[in-house]
Image (cartoon, helix red, strand yellow):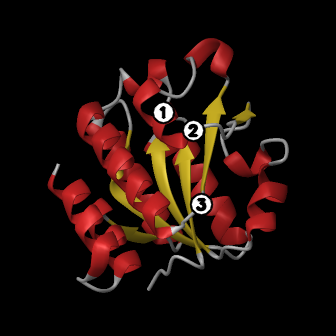
Amino acid sequence: MITPKETLLLIIDVQAKLASAVFEADLVEKNIGKLLRACKLLGVPAIYTEQYPKGLGHTIDPLKELIGDDQPFEKLSFSCCGGEGFMDRLRSLGRNDILVVGMETHVCVYQTCVELLEFGYNVHLVTDGVSSRTPENRALGIKCIERAGGVPTSTEMAIFELLRVAEGDTFKAISKIIKE
């Protein structure tokens, strides 16, 4: 199971032009926002990327507001692992479990997950936090990531796995996030 001390949230390419074109965009964006807020409360760091921002725009405003002052890793490679400085930053955080969300499931998310697995990371794919332009490509991406060794999870499952106990102020705050 994932723990706050070993986990990192990776948000892949949730950018204006992609986010407006993917299947169930509103639900995916809402789930990523919930997960990001819960991770902040639990001390789980986040890294986010942008694929060719000149053409696809920047990270959508609601997520950018939650992320704060951190800067995105800009990339041209589909896999985040090929982005300049990305692997150095990931290694510096010393986390082995990577919660993955983002767009598009069958391209950048898939290629990143496979490479992270090859590098020895435990990949936990948040299936309700990823999407593609078509439901078929989303489903195919999820299936291929699972076959490669990625562990499927959901927004709520991941949050409660990180939380572990139903007590205290953190639980109360996270319960409010979940119910939104």
Location of mark 1 (residue): 65
1 and 2 marks in contact (CB < 8 Å): yes
- Per the image, label 2 sits on a secondary structure element best described as loop
3 and 1 marks in contact (CB < 8 Å): no
Q: Is residue 69 left or right of residue 177?
A: right
Q: Nearer the viewer, residue 123 or 89?
A: 89
Residue shown at 68% from the left, 60% from the top? 115
Location of mark 3 (residue): 45
Q: Kindly indicate the quadrant of the structure image that contains residue 125.
A: bottom left
Residue 146 lies, in percent from the top left, at 44, 68
Distance between mark 3 and mark 2 Cα atoms: 12 Å
Q: Kindly indicate the quadrant of the structure image that contains residue 138.
A: top left
Q: Amino acid at mark 2?
A: Gly
Marks 3 and 2, the one that precedes in the sequence? 3
Marks 3 and 1, the one that precedes in the sequence? 3
Residue shown at 36% from the left, 78% from the top? 163
Above or below, 123 against 90 in this view is below
Residue shown at 54% from the left, 66% from the top? 44
Q: Dot 1: within a 10 Å radius of its alpha carbon, few (fewer than 14), some, or many (20 or more) residues?
A: few
Location of mark 2 (residue): 68
Above or below, 106 against 157 in this view is above
- Per the image, label 3 sits on a secondary structure element best described as loop
Distance between mark 3 and mark 1 Cα atoms: 15 Å
Q: Amino acid at mark 3?
A: Pro
Residue shown at 29% from the left, 41% from the top? 30
- Per the image, label 1 sits on a secondary structure element best described as helix
Pick the quarter of the image with the N terminus: bottom left
